[in-house]
Amino acid sequence: MKDIKTILRERYRNSERDIILDGADLVSQAGYTLVPNFILYRTDLSAYAKLIYATILSYAWGQSKAAFPGQERLAQDCGVGVATVKRYIRELITKRCMTVLRRGQGRTNIYILHFKRR
């Protein structure tokens, strides 16, 4: 039996997108940042993790080819340092709110934001 990360890697290996909205519907992809309530009201997520999730989500809305602008830009947009961004991305991964697929060979990572509990 394959684990979820292996399944996602196989599904999105050749994706042209940097951020994938797993479970998002067509209406919510119209161009605004909609933070799922299950993220907003989770008591086991820090405020910074919620901010990082919402900001990454904002980069994806309404773009034909969503691009993750890099951790330096994310840090600047959130008003925190790069180390803080890395720490809270790890929290989101640990809490299963996000999956990061590393493509290697100079290619960008794929950030999958989960819109449902895993």
Image (cartoon, rainbow, N blue to C red):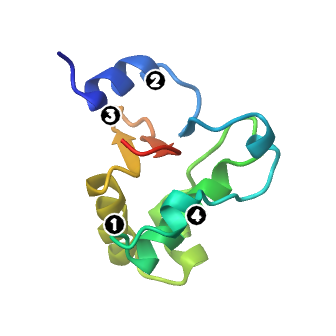
Which residue is at a point 32% across and 75% down the rendered structure image?
83
Which residue is at a point 30% across and 56% down the rendered structure image?
95
Helix, strand or loop under label 3: loop
Is 22 on the left-hand or right-hand side of 96?
right
Is 28 on the left-hand or right-hand side of 88?
right
Distance from the alpha carbon under mark 2 to that under mark 3: 14 Å
Crowding near the residue tagged with mark 4, few <14, some 14–19, many ≥20 C-alpha atoms within 10 Å: some
User: Between tags 4 and 1, which lies in front?
Assistant: 4
| Residue on which the image places disc 1 | 86
Crowding near the residue tagged with mark 2, few <14, some 14–19, many ≥20 C-alpha atoms within 10 Å: some
- Residue 47 sits in which quadrant? bottom left
Q: Which amino acid does label 4 sit on?
A: Ala
4 and 1 marks in contact (CB < 8 Å): no
| Residue on which the image places disc 4 | 54
Q: Is residue 77 above or below residue 62?
A: below
Residue 37, given in percent of the width and then of the height, sits at 57, 61
Distance from the alpha carbon under mark 2 to that under mark 4: 22 Å
Which residue is at a point 39% across and 37% down the rendered structure image?
106
Residue 73, given in percent of the width and then of the height, sits at 55, 67
| Residue on which the image places disc 2 | 12
Circle nearer the N terminus (4, 1)? 4
Which residue is at a point 49% across and 74% down the rendered structure image?
75
Distance from the alpha carbon under mark 4 to that under mark 3: 25 Å
Circle number at residue 104: 3
Circle nearer the N terminus (2, 1)? 2
